[in-house]
Image (tube, coloured by chain):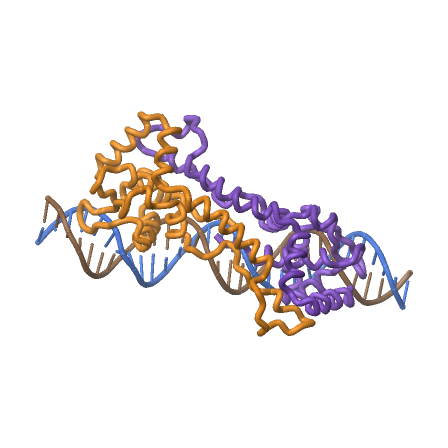
Chain colours: A purple, B orange, C brown, D blue
DNA sequence: TTTATCACGGACAAATTGTATCCTTAATTT
DNA sequence: AAATTAAGGATACAATTTGTCCGTGATAAA
């Protein structure tokens, strides 16, 4: 059970957008070059973010992406689910109903107790991501990355936007 | 990010083994028939459980599987990791080092803050599964499944073991 | 108005992983 | 000796992930 790379890309792209001045648009070309990932494929992730309403998009020359709302109103879960979908990590197939010695095919049963625990674990995972806002991520970033590196990166992106 | 079916199968098989009297061996053929899943493929999951030391195996006629330790000493995480592996659900590719405006390829950096949150979520998920013991699962089972169904199932498996 | 740049989105292809079957070998009971 | 069982390798098929390519429409700048 491993998340796709698109999730990582999307998270990093969102932190870039979150650090930009208001109204600044960043194209997928710039985002792709900045992160060293294929532009066309990254574009799919950005489309997912747009479809989820997390980013605003602008077509045409000098077009690109910007956050559609403040970074403290966007959680990491929002981003992960936008790209990865919101299906649970455990897909109960109800194999208990295959039990050959009783006919449980049509009987109504409470939710499978094994699935229940898996769902509980799934929720714990989501809760952590739901509580972490994009603004928190930016704050963390400023703690661990040297200021000059942060500034140079911002200037680089701004210079291309 | 979705777990494979083998995890579900393994969890259900372990609950069957946990309900058996001491020293009883259950073959993969019986486990497969009971759960309505392909025997050969289920066998792979059982091999994984054996490799992880969660079940004892016995070859030859009347051979099969039994728990290798008490059900309260086996967690759901033990079972999930035995089948699914213990790789984290988020695989950080360190794309922050691809940043074209600074050379971060070889610089030592603290763990990526985005990865850190993903790992935290991963741990929350694992914690729930680690705390839930196989014995707890059995207890839950007795609450939600009618007693006659439980008894008939046990008798069916015992009759074939 | 023309041209270049951008997001969008469909079609396609390659690589990886998940699901499953088959068969041989070795161990063990009857 | 014969039958049964787990172990494990080889293989095939399906689904998903990863990635590319190209056409369309929007839009800004020349």
Q: Is residue B10 above or below residue A65?
A: above
Quadrant in which the C terminus of chain A is drawn: bottom right
Viewer-proximal residue among B79 and B35: B79
Q: Quadrant of residue B11?
A: top left
Q: Is residue B109 above or below residue A57?
A: below
Q: Quadrant of residue B141?
A: top left
Percent across and percent down for residue B120 are 53, 52
Percent across and percent down for residue C24 are 23, 60
Q: Is residue B24 above or below residue B89?
A: above
- Give the side of residue A63 with respect to residue A46, left or right: right
Percent across and percent down for residue A4 are 55, 56
Q: Is residue D20 above or below residue B36?
A: below
Q: Residue at x 79, y 55 (%)?
A: A22
Viewer-proximal residue among C20 and B139: B139
Percent across and percent down for residue B99 are 65, 68
Q: Residue at x 62, y 65 (%)?
A: B96
Q: Report how many numbered discs are placed on residues in the image.
A: 0
- Give the side of residue C13 with respect to residue B23, left or right: right
Viewer-proximal residue among B128 and D6: B128
Q: Residue at x 68, y 52 (%)?
A: A135
């Amino acid at each position: 059970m491993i998340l796709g790379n698109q999730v990582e890309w999307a998270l990093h792209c969102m932190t870039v957008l979150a650090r930009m001045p208001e109204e600044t648009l960043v194209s997928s070309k710039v985002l792709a070059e900045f992160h060293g990932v294929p532009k066309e494929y990254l574009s799919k992730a950005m489309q997912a973010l747009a479809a989820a309403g997390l980013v605003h998009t602008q077509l045409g020359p000098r077009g690109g992406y910007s956050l559609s709302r403040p970074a403290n109103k966007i959680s990491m879960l929002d981003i992960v689910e936008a790209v990865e979908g919101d299906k649970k990590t455990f897909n109960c197939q109800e194999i208990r109903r295959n039990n050959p010695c009783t006919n449980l095919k049509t009987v109504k049963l409470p939710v499978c107790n094994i699935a229940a625990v898996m769902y509980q674990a799934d929720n714990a995972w989501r809760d952590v991501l739901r509580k972490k806002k994009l603004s928190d991520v930016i704050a963390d970033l400023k703690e661990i990355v040297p200021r000059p590196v942060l500034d140079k990166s911002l200037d680089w992106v701004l210079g291309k936007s």
